Amino acid sequence: MAGLCWPSLGTPAEILENSVRRHEQEFIIHVELAVDASVTDVRAIVSQLNKLSRLSKSVIASEVSSVPSTETIRLRVVLRPCVLWFCRTIVKVSAVKRIQRDRWEFEGLPELSDFRSARESLTVGFRDGRSVLRYDAALVPGFFVPRIIGVWAVRHVIARELRHVAHEIERLSH
């Protein structure tokens, strides 16, 4: 039973899937990342939403506040991603619900964000002896994104970011 929660030690982090599609202004993203850390550790690390800047170079700050009379929290993230030469500081505010022990859903609050729409989910799982993070998103920026910034460039930036996130999760878990 313990094998269900522990990855095989020494298996390097691996990007299992990295898919980005663009439909008009909406970016549809699906990524899966296997890491050399226990599911318990991964869950504990990614659930600390107020400390996202320690996992990602693009995150400048993350703040969590409770929403009275609900099980929802509000997450405000300030990011500075760069795709090719296009860098921009952006704010994304979401209502976050922990659906299950290993799954979070994020619904963007456009009136407080630089996104017209943002729906995201994050799941921590276990597959083939390793912990796996799965992230799905449908994002509509409320700011201009040049068409030259195509899905290839976004996918490349996500891959670079995922490698860093995996390294930090593994570092924090050991």
Image (cartoon, helix red, strand yellow):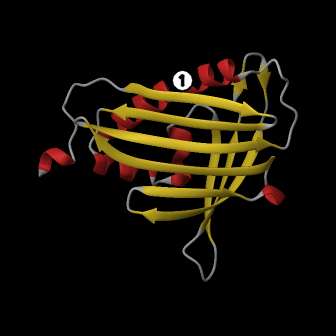
In the image shown, does 146 or 87 lie closer to the viewer?
146
Picture coordinates of residue 67 (x, y %)?
64, 74
* In the depicted structure, whether residue 153 falls above or below residue 41: above
Left or right relative to 151: residue 147: right
Picture coordinates of residue 56 (x, y %)?
55, 35
* In the depicted structure, whether residue 32 falls above or below residue 121: above
Left or right relative to 33: residue 156: right
Q: Quadrant of the C terminus?
A: top left
User: From this viewpoint, which residue is outermost toward the bottom?
Assistant: 69
Q: Quadrant of residue 60?
A: top right
Left or right relative to 91: residue 54: left
In the image shown, does 26 or 3 lie closer to the viewer?
26
User: What's the amino acid at mark 1?
Assistant: Ala
Label 1: few (<14), some (14–19) or many (≥20) C-alpha neighbours in 10 Å: some
User: What residue appears at the point 50 percent right and 57 percent down from the top-left corner?
Assistant: 104
In the image shown, does 115 or 42 lie closer to the viewer?
115
User: What residue appears at the point 34 percent right and 33 percent down from the top-left corner?
Assistant: 35
Left or right relative to 149: residue 62: left
Picture coordinates of residue 102 (x, y %)?
39, 56
Label 1, on which residue?
A: 159
Picture coordinates of residue 110 (x, y %)?
80, 56
Q: Secondary structure at mark 1?
A: helix
* In the depicted structure, whether residue 153 falls above or below residue 132: above
